[in-house]
Image: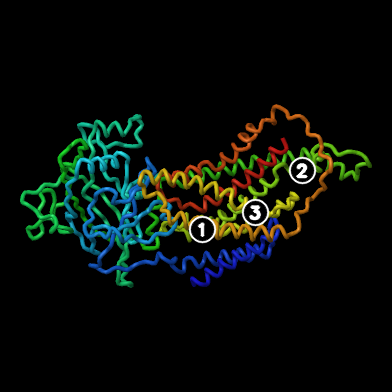
Amino acid sequence: RQCFQCQCCVNAMARRTHSAGNALPLWRPASLATFSCLLLGTLSLTAAFYLPGVAPTDYHKGDDLKPKVEALTSVRTQLPYEYYVLPFCDQGVNMVNQDALNLGEVLRGSRIYELPYKFSMGVDENCKILCRKKYSQQEIEAFSLMIEEDYRAHFLLDNLPVAMSVFHESDDGSTLKAYETGYPLGHVTRAGSMEMFDPDNDKGEDPEQWGATGQIVLFNHLRFTILYHEDPSRHGMRIVGFEVEPYSVEHTYVNQIDFDECFNEIAGENNNCALNTCSATDKVSLSSPPLLLDPKKTKPTEVIWTYDVVFEPSPIKWSTRWDTYLQSADDAQVHWFSILNSFMIVVFLSGLIAMIMIRTLRKDFQRYERGETLEEGQEETGWKLVHGDVFRTPPRAAWLAVLIGTGTQLCVSCAILLVFACLGFLSPANRGALMQATLFLFVFMGMFGGYTAARFFRMFKGTAWRANALWTAMLFPGTCFGVFFVVNLLIWGQKSSGAVPFTTLLAMLLMWLCISVPLVLVGAFFGYRMQPIEHPVRVNQIPRQVPEESPLVGNAIRNILVGGILPFGAVFVEVFYVLSSIWQHQIYYLFGILFLVLVILLLTCSEVTIVMCYF
């Protein structure tokens, strides 16, 4: 089945590539019907098997589970860091052995390492001691800075990110459960109280002032809740949820304890490693005194790291375990309202264009109905005056061809990417797959860009097609790579894991120079050999004198602003959600709605162009 579906995708892309023989490819009814059948067949097959790399894993009671850590991220700084940039417990962790990452994960700043936590499937354990650390003043300052900047730790278990439960009340009064991925390293409280700083408060308060005058609380105890689904027919358990509740506890003990011997041991079990704050039967309480950090303290600060593990059965099936991660409160209504608003803009523009066409062509229609023709020597009037100058070669036509070719390469890449995303091939279970697919598609779609640029370049009567093809291959990717390189140097100076390694930069450079550039040249070679695009009307040899521009329409900046308001108004809500997902490290998955918004954007831009050209 997997091979059959892959063959369907290859055949569909091959047909699409074959249809690029013209400058403006058109879908024939037969090819459109074939593509529809392939699309429906692919949709029916997606439910028949699991995507490669995300097949379920069955566990049995007592099996060891291996949690891992991805990164430390913050919505305030946008700089990810490796988890072990802070002196967390690393006993038994091989710091040299790092999980293999795809290109998208590396560009996101992910660095996946093992964790010292030890879970046994189906075995609940309370107050397990991870380690004891004595931190210097410099290390406490590092923890305090990360807490003040709202950094969150992101763990992984069975390819699921750890998350904190958030409950919302729906319109019908029911309670909806959603997730916030990761957990905060701590929080800042107001001086003299345990009130936590709320980043969504409307009081205009600065959290940095809280850090200067308040207290910094470190979460040193984690309570993990692992949800599993058990099917008697499989004789195994599958993990369907990974939740965490962070606590801050100032652990105390009476007797001398050898914490090296208490690694991953339950406190107080067999009268060893006993703590006063929790044990195998007594859980950590919210009323326990919190662990406060004092960056000004010169003496070492002792921190005991502990955790609980709780396993809970869940009715959630493995195939729908990501639904809770993707749920958000009332977002669907906002998206559909945005689409309705955009649709109304399209209807308004369609009516305006219809009015323009009726007003412009009414006299011609009346004349044609009467059977009248223009006498010899009689000149056309109105909009037909410029029909002999519309297709005149513009100044700097070579640059226009380069931009058209690059735009075609981007559009084809985004269209294929959106199709695969709508079909579910770029699910959040494949971390970094979206970014990696974006880069690969842009690189391999270089042939479309070179072909289109060469066709337009020849239409503009250009001769140096090789130079034009090189500019098409170099201009946009070179500019992006240069900006990316400079920004990467700045991130590298901050010692962030978001800095792309030199080997990855070299690999991206080779992809560009060894794959994208040759494909652009091949496309330009075939495009320039094609017959030039024929204009529907003849271009006058003598250009018509352009009248003086009126103050109303002569300002280019004003035209750009007026022409951009309606397209922006049609998509700004969806753009807001996409950018919020990027900057706030959230999961964006509404690709179907994004496709509808893209169609509305294309219609809006086309109609705005007609209106602006008429006026």
Looking at the rendered structure, the secondary structure element under dot 2 is loop
Cα separation between marks 3 and 2:
25 Å
Q: Position of residue 440 (x, y in %)?
A: 52, 58
Specify the amino acid type for callout 3. Answer: Ala
Question: Quick check: 208 above or below 468?
Answer: above
**Label 3 vs label 1: CA separation?**
18 Å
Q: Nearer the viewer, mark 2 or mark 1?
A: 1
Judge by depth and name the residue closer to the eye, 493 or 266: 493
Q: Is residue 59 left or right of residue 265?
A: right
Say whether residue 170 is left or right of residue 349: left
Residue 175, visible in the rendered structure: no
Q: Secondary structure at mark 1?
A: helix
Q: Nearer the viewer, mark 3 or mark 2?
A: 3
Q: Where is residue 7 drawn, in percent x and y?
A: 55, 70
- Secondary structure type for disc 3: helix
CA–CA distance in space, label 2 to label 1: 42 Å
Kind of residue at badge 2? Val
Residue bearing the label numbered 3: 469
Q: Is residue 194 above or below residue 39?
A: above
Q: Can residue 310 be seen in this snapshot?
A: yes
| Proximity of marks 3 and 1: CB atoms separated by less than 8 Å | no
The x, y position of residue 543, in whole percent, is: 81, 39
**Kind of residue at disc 1:** Leu
Q: Which residue is mark 1?
A: 510
